[in-house]
Image (cartoon, rainbow, N blue to C red):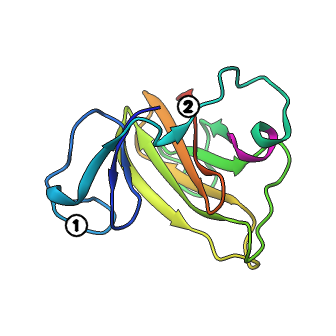
Amino acid sequence: MKGIVCSVCGFISIDGSTPEACPVCGAPKKAFKEKEDAIVTPSDATDKVEANKKHIPKITVNKKCELIPEGCVDVNVKIGEITHPILPEHHIMYIDCYVDKKFLSRTHLTAGRLYPAAGLHLKVKNGKFTAIEKCNIHGAWISEVDL
């Protein structure tokens, strides 16, 4: 899948526009390059090959939050149907989250110390939630759900 990629931190703009500054690292617009193969999108996400099972983000939406009860929507992202390795030599570097193709946050993962997962408490109640994970070996993978 095509994306506009920050050459400094790897952030991928998925809305078709180049930001004036990277929302993750602050790099200027000139640091971005369009890449045709920025994100791995399996032709059939239900295909049960091992790479898909370990890389496609699994997104769970809970419309009721116990931590912030008024209007909060919880979104949890787990990398892979089969838990992805999180070893120094093979790990998920970060998970980027978007709503309606607009960047929300990046969760950095430390190899060997964390599971490949992240959770957010959203003020947004509707829209399309997207998660992109970056594997240090196999690149960026994407998944989307409706809130």
Corner quadrant of residue 142: top right
Main secondary structure of the magenta stretch:
helix
Side (left or right) of 25 relative to 139: left
Relative depth, front residue between 73 and 111: 111
Q: Amino acid at mark 1?
A: Ala
Tell me where residue 32 appears, x and y as whole percent.
Answer: 25, 53
The disc at residue 144 is 2
Q: Tell me, yes or no, whether the two marked residues, 2 and 1, touch with CB atoms within 8 Å.
A: no
Relative depth, front residue between 72 and 31: 31
**Residue occupying the point 28% across, 49% down:** 33
Number of marks present in the image shown? 2
Tag 1 residue: 27
**Residue occupying the point 50% across, 45% down:** 72
- On whether residue 55 falls in the magenta region, the answer is yes
Q: On screen, 28 above or below 65?
A: below
Q: Secondary structure at mark 1?
A: loop
Tell me where residue 42 appears, x and y as whole percent.
Answer: 65, 28
Q: Secondary structure at mark 2?
A: strand
Q: Which residues are magenta?
A: 53-57
Which badge, 2 or 1, comes first in the chain's sequence? Answer: 1
Front: mark 2 or 1 = 1
- On whether residue 36 falls in the magenta region, the answer is no
